[in-house]
């Protein structure tokens, strides 16, 4: 092996290691686990929606058994990333408190959270495809979502 090739290997192996870890953690096509989603939920969502997903009375909507969540699709990714300022109706109750944005969440993290909350606390909603979530995030209408 010539010296130049050895130099390239020395600089590139950390990148290969990181790429390998990401593929193992998330999968090549955005595969996620409910466990990762639970940890992300605890970090980003649990303060308001509570550990049991029941929300906070008439202030914060529940996620457990929430028709809004169970009937929703990839557009829910927009709410997770950009927050929400509009009044929403969840299980027949109106909620008008703003939800803060999580603009740093990556599509794979959003998918992981959605996988968790759509299958936790007795919820039984199908998983959403990574490509559908990514497409939804690229076309979010942030005018009705983002806080000023």
Image: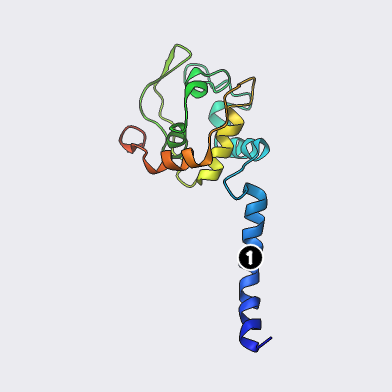
Of 27 and 93, the residue lying toward us? 27
Horizontally, residue 137 falls left or right of residue 54, namely left
The answer to which image quadrant residue 52 occupies is top right
- Lateral position of residue 87 relative to residue 115, left or right: left
Residue extending furthest toward the front = 1
Residue nearer the viewer, 86 or 68: 68
Q: Quadrant of the N terminus?
A: bottom right
Please give the name of the residue rendered at 43% of the width and 41% of the height, measured from the top-left corner. 135
36 to 20, vertically: above or below: above
Q: Is residue 43 above or below residue 59?
A: below
**Picture quadrant of residue 96:** top left
Q: Residue at x 43, y 33 (%)?
A: 79
Q: Residue at x 66, y 58 (%)?
A: 20
Crowding at mark 1 (Cα within 10 Å: few <14, some 14-19, many 20+): few
Q: Quadrant of residue 3?
A: bottom right
Task: From the top left corner, tell me how far across and down residue 60 is, in percent.
Answer: 49, 23
**Vertical placement of 28 versus 93: above or below?**
below
140 to 22, vertically: above or below: above
Which residue appears farthest toward the bottom when viewing the image?
3
Q: Which quarter of the rendered picture does the C terminus lie within? A: top left
Which residue in the protein does label 1 denote?
A: 16
Image location of residue 50, percent across then percent down = 59, 26
């Amino acid at each position: 092996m010539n010296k130049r090739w050895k130099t390239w290997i020395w600089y590139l192996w950390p990148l290969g290691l990181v790429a390998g870890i990401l593929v193992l953690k998330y999968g090549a096509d955005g595969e996620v686990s409910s466990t990762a989603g639970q940890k992300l939920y605890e970090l980003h969502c649990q303060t308001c929606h509570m550990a049991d997903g029941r929300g906070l009375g008439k202030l914060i909507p529940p996620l457990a058994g929430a028709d809004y969540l169970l009937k929703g699709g990839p557009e829910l990714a927009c709410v997770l990333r950009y927050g929400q300022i509009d009044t929403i109706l969840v299980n027949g109750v109106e909620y008008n408190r703003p939800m803060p944005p999580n603009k740093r969440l990556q599509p794979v993290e959003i998918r992981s959270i959605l996988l968790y909350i759509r299958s936790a606390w007795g919820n039984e909603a199908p998983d959403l495809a990574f490509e559908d979530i990514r497409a939804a995030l690229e076309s979010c209408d942030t005018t009705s979502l983002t806080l000023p």
